[in-house]
Image (cartoon, helix red, strand yellow):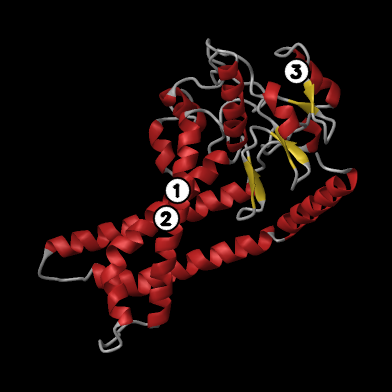
Amino acid sequence: MFTPTRRGFINGVDRIANSVIFAIGPVFIVLAIGLIGMATLTYFTVVFPYFYQWDDDYIWTKFSYYAGLLFSIYMIVCIFFHYYMAIRTKPGGVLNAGTAETESDDPTLQELFIELEEYQVFPKTCKKCHLPKPERAHHCSVCKKCVLRFDHHCPWIANCVGHFNHRYFLLFMTYLVISCFYFVAVGWKVFLISLDFGVEWDYWMPRPYMALTFLLAVAIGIALGGMCSWHYYLVLTSQTTVEFYNNQYAKRSAQQKGEVYVNPFDLGCLNNLRQFFNVGQNYPIYTIFLPIPISPPGNGKVWEKNAMQYTTVNDISDDTD
């Protein structure tokens, strides 16, 4: 048990940390754009001309050159598009849908309670912002508001990852991880050359930049690859990061009672993927590979549940907000 003085100190430190995270968000965005931009410049001035060498005598080299060029441009467009959308798209708040709505379209508190009462006998209320709390919504201590289907607050996008921008966030990570490993796969030879000062360097980009970019691609590919894999696991099991830990607690509690906990929002891996990417019913599956804006299904306040539900995630999550 914490004493009131110690609890107050911890809460004060937590508020300061959250304020700092909120304030330095734009710095992280500039840093991310700078690193991606440097990698892009290094790729097109060193790696691409080294790996895709033009030869007028062989048609295969021409084909691979143009194919590599198109693939490279496609990956860069997808990275920057999904990064921009993850930053600019509102994750979804309790009093708005997170879309391009005007303030006059936002529901009043009374309208929101009426909407939630259609699906919940006793709509929950957030203990921190004192607003109606839809299922799967959680309070972000950095943004100081409840976010629909809240996953986490990401300083690299200066935004919460929630219902309306989680798709963009995951696809941004996906394309960035693929690009990092692609950079390593086609650039490792020229990376070794950049370390050998006895070999002539015929490229505009200095050697240290090539070496640094290669090491960054390895580090970011591994680190972000692990995080990306984690998020795909969450998508396949229809969980957010917050819900995963709540569900683990629910499973242990149910096990102690000799019962089995089932995530009520898990509709099966395939249906979970379709729901998350909004493909199959509303959009064709190939839209996953296109840099176009696509909203998730539903309003983020009410969710379809499976027939085996044992309890709801929010029943155990109030104390963890």
Q: CA distance from mark 2 to mark 3?
A: 44 Å
Q: Secondary structure at mark 2?
A: helix
Residue 254 in sight: yes
Given residues 256 and 293, the one toward you in this image is: 256
Q: Amino acid at mark 2?
A: Ile
Given residues 194 and 75, the one toward you in this image is: 194
* Mark 3 residue crowding within 10 angstroms, few (<14) / some (14–19) / many (20+): some
Q: Which residue is mark 2?
A: 222
* Contact (Cβ within 8 Å) of mark 2 with mark 1: yes
Please provide percent x and percent y for residue 69: 31, 61
Nearer the camera: disc 2 or disc 3: 2
Number of residue marks = 3
Label 2 or label 3, whichever comes before in sequence order: 3
Nearer the camera: disc 3 or disc 1: 1
For residue 161, side relative to residue 190 (left or right)? right
Residue 65 numbered mark, or none: none
Query: Residue lying farthest left?
Result: 57
For residue 284, side relative to residue 66 (left or right)? right
* Mark 1 residue crowding within 10 angstroms, few (<14) / some (14–19) / many (20+): few
Q: Secondary structure at mark 3?
A: helix
Residue 78 in sight: no
Q: Amino acid at mark 1?
A: Gly
Q: Secondary structure at mark 1?
A: helix
Q: Amino acid at mark 3?
A: Glu
Please provide percent x and percent y for residue 310: 59, 13
Residue 226 numbered mark, or none: 1
Residue in the picture at 47% in, 26% down: 272
Q: Which residue is mark 3?
A: 115
Residue in the picture at 37% in, 69% down: 43
> Based on the displayed image, in which of its 4 quarters is residue 221 positioned?
bottom left
Label 3 or label 1, whichever comes before in sequence order: 3
Above or below 37: residue 207: below
